[in-house]
Image (cartoon, grey):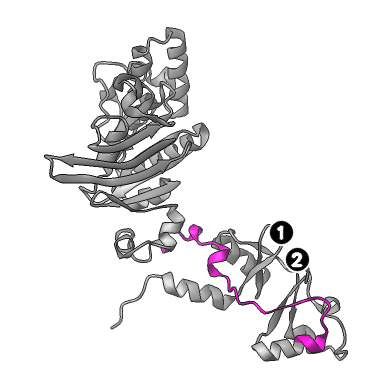
Amino acid sequence: MVELKNVRKTYDNKTDVVKNLDLIINDGELVVLIGESGCGKTTTMQMINRLIDPSDGVILLNGKDIREIPKTELRKNIGYVIQDIGLFPHWTIAQNIATVPNLCKKSKEKIDQKVRSLMETIGLPYDQYAKRYPRELSGGQKQRIGVARALANDPELILMDEPFSALDPITRDQLQDELLRLHDELKITIVFVTHDIDEAIKLGDKIAIMQDGHIMQLDTPEEILKNPANEFISSFIGANRIWKTPDMLKAGDVMRKDMITITPERTVSQAIESMRKHGAPVLAVIEHKNGEFVGLLGTNRIRTESDLEKKVRDLMKTDVRKLSFDMPLTEVMRLRAERDILYSPVVDAKDKLIGIITNTSIVNVLSQIMPGKEEY
């Protein structure tokens, strides 16, 4: 775990680039630092591996103050990937990847095994690429080598400073996918600096949006898109940004919470009275003791029923497709369209009703986030 406590960086005794910054990066997280130029994101990253030292505050790596760790030892355990990859031009690809393990005097056999494994992992087979030189590679291939070099000594942390920003969009997208695959596979902790909000949303487990040396919001991409902390965040991520990532909208985002309920032991007469009182065309039937959802009762079923003392249990619709709170909206829409569903109950892990989705509830939410049309 990486922890920054009240960290400040001042230049020329007057300019605070980073101001009283607190940040926790848990093991295995990919945390993205993003903000406008000069906000302090790269300075924050460079303080983590002591390329520069903070003016005040403390930075802990697994609970230990990094100032107590010799810089050479600290950096052997932290991989670093930058925009200008910095491969040694007169060394082969295999030699470049093996840089840090060689400095740590690991055995030739272990180094060779690690280099072979990493080259396969990044999609550049050893037999084809090991003896080539950086000048023989494309920009995207060089960045893959840069990532492999950062991983070669099995670091506990990798720092990545705008590593893909100079690449063309297609190569950049491919390398983002590759990084996500490696992160899922290796479960390594990564701090990633970018100025591109789309890249941050795609990659980050959490995003720290910075302004003038402060973290203005630290949260998941989903939460930042749905609930920006202030006007600066809203402006920075862009209006209607979530419409570009509809998979982040969940069932819980489009459900109504004011569903009218009734218990199975009530009568048809009582159900009719409840519908009239609340103007509800359908009632959610829940068990009295635990709130478990058991069915729906709509006007279409009541309309033909003459026995007003019949129990709701005997009349309700039970074969109802229940949805989880975190089901992606795209899947919700698909299910509702396939089965021509009007009412979709949303339940928690214990089948307790927490809301209902209707066509109107979906439209109400989407109308708020869809890009607006110009008026003429």
- Residue bearing the label numbered 1: 350
Decide: few, some or many residues near mark 2? Use Cα within 10 Å; few <14, some 14-19, many ≥20: few
Is residue 173 at all visible to an observer of this figure? no
Label 2 SS: loop
Residue drawn at x 53%, y 66% is 253
Please name whichever residue, 130 or 207, is drawn nearer the observer in this view of the structure. 207
Please report the bounds of the magenta region as a residue range: 243-271
> Would you identify the image quadrant in which residue 83 lies?
top left
4 in the magenta segment: no
- Residue bearing the label numbered 2: 290
Answer left or right for 22 relative to 154: left
Total residue callouts? 2
Image quarter hosting the N terminus: top left
Answer left or right for 136 relative to 342: left
Percent x, y of residue 46: 27, 34
Residue drawn at x 51%, y 75% is 363
C-alpha gap between disc 2 and disc 1: 9 Å
Percent x, y of residue 60: 38, 33
Residue drawn at x 55%, y 78% is 360
> Would you identify the image quadrant in which residue 48 lies?
top left
Q: Amino acid at mark 1?
A: Lys
Image quarter hosting the C terminus: bottom left
Answer left or right for 261 relative to 115: right
- Mark 2–mark 1 contact, CB under 8 Å? yes
Decide: few, some or many residues near mark 1? Use Cα within 10 Å; few <14, some 14-19, many ≥20: few
Residue 366, placed above or below residue 121: below
